[in-house]
Amino acid sequence: MADGQSTDTATHQAPAGRRTWRLPADTVPERPDYAVVRRLVLGSALMLFLELALIRWLGSNVVHLSYFSNFVLLGSFLGIGLGFLIARKSWSLLPYVPVILAVLVIATYLAPVTIDRAGDQIIYFTSLNTSGPPAWLVLPLIFIFVAAVLAGPAEVVGRCFAHLRPLTAYRWDLVGSLIGISSFTLMSFLQAPSVVWGVIVMAAFVVLVGETKRLLTIVAGLGMVTVLLLETLSPGISWSPYYKIHTQDKVLGGIPLTDISVNGVPHQIMRAAAQRLQEEPQYGFPYQRTPGNPLGNVLIIGAGSGSDVAIALAKGARHIDAVDIDPRIMQIGLEKNPDHPYSDPRVTRHVNDGRAFLEGTDNTYDLILFALPDSLALVTGASQIRLESFLFTEQALTAARDHLTPTGAFAMYNYYREDWLIDRLAGTVQAAFGHTPCVDLPGGGQAVVTAALDPANQVCGSDYVPAGTVVAPATDDRPFLYYQGGAIPALYLWTLAGILVISAIAVRTLGGPFRAMRPYADLFFMGSAFMLLETKNIATFALLFGTTWLVNALVFAGVLLIVLAAVETTRRFRTPPLPVVFGGIAASLALCFFVEPAWLLTLPFVPRLVAAVVLAFIPIYLANVAFSKRFGASDDSQSAFGLNLLGAMLGGCLEYLGLLTGYRNLLVLVAVLYLFAFLLTPRNKGSMISM
């Protein structure tokens, strides 16, 4: 390929009907063509940025999709894998992807879809009464559209892989991915609206698409950006790092209030504390059940827009630490709450994960309130971890107990919807405090659970009697509070089955017979194992440092940096043979299995961070040394990398087994998958084929 010639131009000059297009391995130059490198970096950055943007935007506009955002992630993996397979063809999907993206965005905005979240095994928090199409229909459709969109930039990257040595291509792919995730993290920090995301994506597509189809790209991009601009300019719309937020000022019965909806679902109502106490008695129960509480120092987790803070001030609290994970909702409370609690000098605001704040503070409190801390979003990359998941485990409530003064008390309240969940939470409080709490049931699925450190300091309205069999407390290893137990819900199983069938058909159509991919079967299982390992690490870091968007972004960036370090190690140094590396993977997984994350929670922040990084990243590093050694020896880097990504998609499906096994036991499955990879690695005269 001539210096400076784009891969897009070279592709269109390939002979008609040819199934693959790549330079023979022995003709790929040592020194990379930096025009190809720049294109690869831009394509990789677009892949990561677009994936994160679709997870956020679709979750905010398809009601209840934020409870199923992992299916968008799975669609992204399939699309990226298919893009690498398309890169072996003489035809291109890329010019039409901006049109597909525009159709997805415009149709979603103009014809909103609601996923029916009904189910008796898992509770989905929402006060919006909707039915909508069944999830088994909507989720596969979204999955297909997302896969088609992500296939475009992946095709660009795949074609660039054909012109670079495998590890050189992989290196620059990782650099691009880091740029993509850093860019979206910056957008989250700035609370940028969706139109900004759209402009960035459109500009990248305009650069990547060839001149012959550039006009089509511009037209499609303008249509998409126009819709996103309309959304951005809609009254009351703003974005936090977690949600699309809609505020609406109203007057009800002559009393002003502000409705706050997130992702299309009613979430909070701001109104005067005196009015709320008069009409909603549950807010007063924590104070009634502990009448002698001095309220010198109060901690409110889930402080939101400040209503619970205003009530605590009205009850005489002398100092309040108000904690909420969402900075934008707290800002709205600062601006609009009629009682102005966040302007009171007795209140200190903290934007943080509730569990992380508990583990990081040395303060003790007369009252700790969990004030309606529920979310409508999952932690990205984890199918069952919600933002508040680690706040309601037995270990978390024990930590709350340990932060109480001798006369202190703990209380939580919410609209819990189901009797079994109320009983489970009451049982968890009983296990943590060692005595039966007060449980008040105002009706409508509401409950207030209150427990004083000393049972003599609590005065219950009536004796608590469970409504049925009490589900065991959620734990840090199984933080699935809203999962009643039993088999994996049929909703997930049928949807995952449909996704796997769609994926198998697509891969067979574009990649040819599966037996032709047999030489890279080990890379497929490496992808599955790595995805599960990454999920386990996301869960561990969420527990140790919080479920905030920043922690999540740092975990993903850290993983990419460690993978890049493994690639550079393999490129520059002589590494041990593959059997030795696989042995190191097995040993590091065993170490992670036997070291309890709870042990690390007792450490100060810096030692905890160092220990967590070492435990999490040693197996990731070794796994990617093994991958790099195998990938560097591949004759067809496009097929090898694409199959690895498709394996990651299978790993994303297997992640749902965590509901049954807990996150710690997922490491056993990771070890089994790496064993399969070891056994399926091709041999030449008895030796594994690798660099």
Image: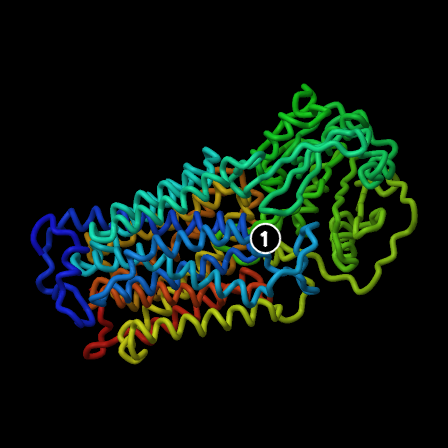
Quadrant of the image containing the N terminus: bottom left
Q: In this view, does 275 lie to the left or right of 204?
A: right
Q: Is residue 514 visible?
A: yes
The type of residue carrying mark 1 is Val
Near-viewer residue (565 or 111): 111
Q: Position of residue 581 (x, y in %)?
A: 31, 63
Q: Quadrant of residue 493?
A: bottom right
Q: Which of these two is toward me, 130 or 547?
A: 130
Which residue in the structure is indicated by mark 1?
63
Q: Is residue 462 left or right of residue 346?
A: right
Q: Estimate the x, y position of residue 517 in percent, counting from the top left.
A: 28, 75
Q: What element carries label 1?
A: loop
**What residue lies at 88% left-to-right and 33% top-to-bottom?**
291
Task: Tell whether 71 sits left or right of 560.
Answer: right
Question: How far across and down, in percent of the image, does residue 179 sit?
Answer: 33, 43
Residue 115 in percent (x, y) is at: 59, 59
Answer above or below: position of 22 versus 106: below
Quadrant holding the C terminus: bottom left
Residue 568 seen in render: no
Q: Image point 18% across, 51% down: which residue? A: 36
* Residue sitting farthest toward the top: 345
Q: Residue at the spot x=77%, y=60% of the render? A: 420
